[in-house]
Image (cartoon, rainbow, N blue to C red):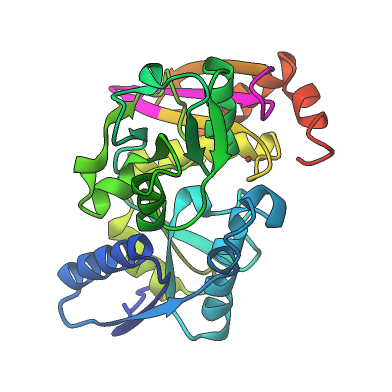
């Protein structure tokens, strides 16, 4: 059966500078594929954008960044929504589909400071800002002499707080800084062996209603098979461990030649307990199987006990 491509697409997006960049990037790629197609951006403010004084772990998690966008898809206000995959809940709402995951930008974390060259240079008691329990647990495990404080807001807001002297350093996703033309602000890239990235970090996902066969077909050329494979492995790992914004958890998959490697960890927020493992398999395998296998190894090492100790909360 032949599926006709749509002649017009409305793209739902958050209104932060980074989200708008991501939406415009996808819009531009669609126009290259379909020069006659009309596109429009629908900027929206989500609950996650409105509530900035509280950590994501306490207000319901990263799903707060996409709920309003999904409502726009459901009502027909918008045809697609563009997300950072690290913000997409591990279990997608029924009736929706991630039609494409584009080629991944730098997935690593970035150390940003105006005074210090790296984490090792920070004096005892220095305040370091991060919005992520995943980053916080890894920092506390390795640098117990530092003060880790919450840091919310968009990329520009976080950099402004650093520049005002509220923090000695902050940790941000390298992808966001690079996409916004702010790579010069990166003091040092943190390698995955040092700070394991979040599940889906650096990857963009394009969501639509599952019943939109025309949209799914139109978006198919934007899908990057290797990135999708890696992100699906990471999400399977997180799903098996009930991963959300309330659990300090990291998962990062890489493909090299014919092999795929997935690394994962679970920790207590204070970094006092941490379990890590990794598995390398042929790329020809199923990503969900790899994610589940790493999750089972972490569980065997005590991940369930760590999760059970998080005040009953299932990052």
Does the magenta portion include 258? yes
Residue 243 in picture, x, y percent from top left: 65, 40
| Depth check, front residue: 315 or 92 | 315
Give the residue at x 21% y 68%. 28
The reply, left or right, for residue 169 in relation to residue 301 is left
Q: From the viewer's perspective, is 116 left or right of 287? A: left
Res 43 quadrant in image: bottom left
The question of residue 301 being in magenta is answered with no
Q: Is residue 146 above or below residue 313?
A: above
Q: 88 or 272: which is nearer to us?
A: 272
- Which residue occupies the foreground of this view, 39 or 311? 311
State the residue at coordinates (26%, 70%): 27
The magenta region covers 254-272
Picture layout, residue 109 above or below residue 208: above
Main SS of residues in magenta: strand
Assign the N terminus to one quadrant of the image: bottom left
The residue lying at 71 percent from left, 40 percent from top is 242
Q: Residue at x 41, y 50 (%)?
A: 161
- Across and down, in percent, residue 155 comes to 38, 54
Q: Is residue 286 shown to the viewer in this render?
A: no
Residue 51: % across, % down: 60, 64
């Amino acid at each position: 059966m032949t599926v006709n491509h749509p002649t017009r697409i409305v793209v739902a997006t958050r209104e932060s500078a980074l989200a708008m960049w991501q939406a415009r990037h996808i819009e531009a790629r669609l126009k290259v594929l379909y020069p006659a197609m009309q596109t429009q951006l629908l900027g929206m403010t989500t609950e996650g954008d409105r509530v900035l004084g509280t950590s994501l772990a306490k207000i319901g998690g990263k799903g707060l960044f996409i709920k309003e966008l999904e409502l726009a898809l459901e009502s027909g206000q918008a045809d697609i929504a563009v997300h950072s995959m690290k913000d997409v809940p591990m279990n997608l709402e029924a009736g929706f589909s991630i039609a494409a995951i584009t080629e991944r930008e730098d997935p690593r974390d970035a150390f940003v400071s105006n005074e210090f060259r790296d984490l090792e240079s920070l004096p005892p008691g220095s305040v370091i800002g991060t919005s992520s329990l995943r980053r916080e647990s890894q920092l506390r495990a390795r640098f117990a002499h530092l003060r880790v404080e919450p840091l919310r807001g968009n990329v520009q807001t976080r950099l402004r707080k650093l520049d005002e002297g509220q923090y000695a350093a902050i940790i941000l996703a390298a992808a966001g800084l690079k996409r916004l033309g702010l790579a010069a602000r990166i003091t040092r890239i943190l390698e995955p062996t040092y700070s394991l990235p979040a599940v889906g970090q650096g990857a963009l996902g394009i969501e639509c209603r599952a019943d939109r066969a025309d949209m799914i077909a139109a978006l198919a050329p934007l899908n990057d098979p290797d990135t999708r494979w890696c992100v699906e492995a990471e999400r399977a790992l997180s799903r098996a461990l009930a991963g959300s914004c309330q659990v300090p958890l990291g998962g990062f998959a890489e493909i090299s030649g014919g092999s795929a490697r997935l690394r994962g960890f679970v920790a207590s927020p204070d970094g006092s307990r941490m379990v890590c493992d990794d598995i390398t398999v042929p790329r020809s395998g199923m990503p969900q199987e790899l994610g589940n296998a790493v999750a089972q190894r972490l569980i065997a090492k005590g991940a369930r006990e760590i999760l059970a100790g998080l005040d009953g909360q299932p990052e």
